[in-house]
């Protein structure tokens, strides 16, 4: 897991090596991040009445337990929204920033291997990957939300579970470009990642945690493309 986390941290080094290219990678991330931030702020503004509307049965409980339940539920709802925003952010940013991230990926491939694989699965495969990322992110967010109903520890359990699941999803989808370009289909991609599960989780969880920092997603996205390219290379080596 530490090796996977270092792959992301090493990606930030490319800001020094390719500053112009990496700064271009911030543009689509900034646009998508601004739109999602507006949506999260809107959710936060209605979170208190929302939790009250969801839990009318708690109105007759002792005040302390009513507060505990609604705070835990509010934390779970917002945590689920954050996780959904993070995975939606990745899918939307990859679509909006395709030309920029393609150039970053190519620069990493040339620097590390001297060649760029040219297998092109077509726009349908790219759309399917983006759709898969959004759907699986939504399911992870729903699970985090459901776990939030566990008394006392629901908010913590839901958040931790959501980060783990979202980390895995991010590792899968972000490494997809480098693996697909070598003719590796989706099922084989996931088999490779499962064989290096700790490394993939380390990379994905570190990426997810960076995404949760204010403006972290914007600055992390270009570095994540670099790290995911190297993650793909490392899981291929594990298979070999």
Image (cartoon, helix red, strand yellow):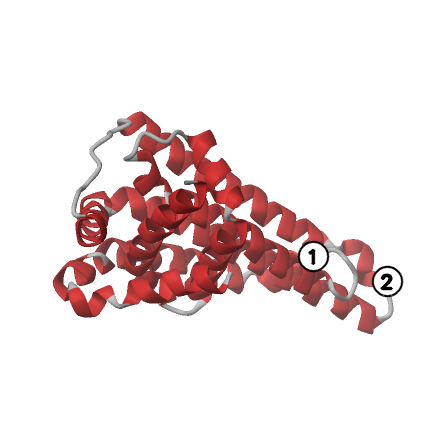
Q: Which mark is residue 60?
A: 2
Q: Residue furthest bottom?
A: 64
For this rendering, which residue is in front, 41 or 204?
Answer: 204
For this rendering, which residue is in front, 74 or 180?
Answer: 180
For this rendering, which residue is in front, 77 or 87?
Answer: 87
Looking at the image, residue 176 lies above or below residue 164: above
Q: Which mark is residue 108?
A: none
Position of residue 120 in the picture relative to residue 166 (left or right): left
Can I make out residue 145 in this image? yes
Query: x and y percent of residue 186 in the render?
Result: 43, 31
Can I make out residue 41 in this image? no
Q: Residue at x 79, y 66 (%)?
A: 66
Q: Residue furthest left?
A: 20
Q: Secondary structure at mark 1?
A: loop
Q: Secondary structure at mark 2?
A: helix
Query: x and y percent of residue 177 in the render?
Result: 31, 40
Query: x and y percent of residue 229 in the render?
Result: 31, 49
To which quarter of the image does residue 96 belong?
A: top left
Looking at the image, residue 206 lies above or below residue 106: below
Q: Check disc 1 and report the residue beneath it.
A: 148
Label 2 or label 1, whichever lies nearer to me, is 1
For this rendering, which residue is in front, 125 or 33?
Answer: 125
> What crowding class fits label 2: few (fewer than 14 Cα within 10 Å), some (14-19), or many (20 or more)?
few
């Amino acid at each position: 897991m530490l090796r996977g986390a270092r792959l992301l941290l090493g990606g930030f080094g490319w800001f020094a090596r390719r500053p112009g290219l990496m700064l271009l990678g911030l543009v689509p991330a900034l646009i998508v991040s601004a739109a999602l931030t507006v949506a999260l702020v809107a959710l936060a503004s209605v979170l208190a009445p929302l939790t009250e509307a969801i839990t009318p049965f708690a109105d007759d409980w002792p005040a302390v337990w009513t507060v505990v339940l609604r705070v835990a539920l509010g934390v779970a709802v917002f945590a689920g929204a954050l996780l959904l925003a993070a995975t939606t952010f990745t899918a939307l940013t990859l679509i909006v920033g395709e030309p920029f991230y393609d150039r970053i990926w190519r620069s990493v491939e040339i620097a590390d291997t001297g060649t760029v694989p040219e297998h092109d699965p077509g726009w349908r495969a790219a759309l399917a990957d983006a759709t898969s990322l959004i759907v699986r992110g939504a399911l992870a967010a729903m699970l985090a939300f459901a776990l939030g109903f566990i008394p006392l520890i629901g908010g913590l359990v839901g958040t931790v579970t959501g980060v783990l699941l979202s980390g895995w999803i991010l590792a899968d989808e972000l490494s997809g470009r480098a693996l697909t370009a070598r003719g590796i289909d989706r099922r084989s991609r996931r088999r490779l990642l499962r064989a290096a599960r700790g490394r993939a989780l380390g990379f994905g969880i570190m990426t997810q945690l960076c995404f949760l920092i204010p403006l972290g997603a914007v600055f992390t996205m270009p570095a994540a493309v670099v790290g995911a390219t190297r993650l793909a290379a490392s899981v291929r080596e594990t298979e070999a």
